[in-house]
Amino acid sequence: MTIAEVSRRYEIPVDTLRYYERIGLLPPVNRAKSGFRDYTEGDCQWVSFIKCMRAAGIPVEALIDYVTLFQQGDSTREARRQILVEQKELLQGRVDEQLRTLEYLERKIQSYDQWNPGAEERLLGLRAAE
Amino acid sequence: MTIAEVSRRYEIPVDTLRYYERIGLLPPVNRAKSGFRDYTEGDCQWVSFIKCMRAAGIPVEALIDYVTLFQQGDSTREARRQILVEQKELLQGRVDEQLRTLEYLERKIQSYDQWNPGAEERLLGLRAAE
DNA sequence: TCTTGACTTGGAGCCTGCTCCAGGGTGTAG
DNA sequence: CTACACCCTGGAGCAGGCTCCAAGTCAAGA
């Protein structure tokens, strides 16, 4: 599978795929005799995984650590699990905060719907953070 | 209220407060004769609002638009509402994606707990994106 | 064989969003 | 009057994460 095909399949720019591999976010992909990358299904699963994690905001660095450990084999299982647990907790925290903000926005928009113009300053006072 | 006090109250670096004001993310703060900023409670509510929005990942640009419109008075009510609605929807989309990723991570961690070492490759196959 | 399009690398550039000076004024306590 | 902490501006610098480009190689069809 060529890089262009993978790019289309996952909607990730080819430059980004190469960049990810360069920095170790994706394990090295095998090459055809020509030197062109030839992605296996296994490679694609990594691509898919990385796409998913990045879309959720998991930092590149944590993912590089994960991939690196993975390539070192079984002995790193626990360390890898730790990364996943830690990132999951961080993500949970971010999501919680965003859910609270969503509720706040909801109320604020409602106040825009209900109240008559001129109540400008009061709108702010719905309490944002803290 | 001095900038240092606001900084402590909301845990935002003074440099960031000044930066926000510079780029129009916060309405201009009144100055004492000395030229020092003197934050009112109203200013603080803006700070609080901006802090909350930024923590949820709402882009600076959208917030600048909102603040700018706000300063133009009642006639911009509807445009402001629109910004809130749009950002709320974008945020909702991001949260949905993150919730899916959280579930995925949950399952992946469980598989780390249950299965014996050596099942490396299978772990990936839990399906990431798509 | 020639052309055209896809692939390669390495490095530069860019965008967002801060963060950190340098150089200089202010205000209060001793 | 001096010290010392705090404030100011404008601009440079930085971190994360891509994105673009030049210069060159490869391959498949006419």
Image: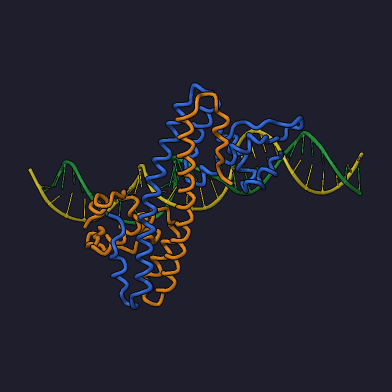
Chain colours: A blue, B orange, C yellow, D green
Q: Nearer the viewer, residue A120 or A113?
A: A113
Q: Is residue A32 above or below residue A88?
A: above
Say which quarter of the image contains residue D2: top left
Compared across the picture, whether C22 is left or right of B9 comes to right
Which quarter of the image is occupied by the N terminus of chain B?
bottom left
Compared across the picture, whether D17 is left or right of B1 comes to right
Estimate the x, y position of residue C26 in percent, counting from the top left: 21, 56
Residue drawn at x 33%, y 50% is B15
Q: Nearer the viewer, residue B11 or C25?
A: B11
Q: Is residue C18 above or below residue A107?
A: above
Compared across the picture, whether A16 is left or right of B107 comes to right
Estimate the x, y position of residue A125 in percent, counting from the top left: 28, 65
Residue drawn at x 49%, y 33% is B111
Residue drawn at x 39%, y 45% is A92
Farthest residue, direction front: B114
Estimate the x, y position of residue A56 in percent, counting from the top left: 48, 46
Q: Is residue A86 above or below residue A115?
A: above
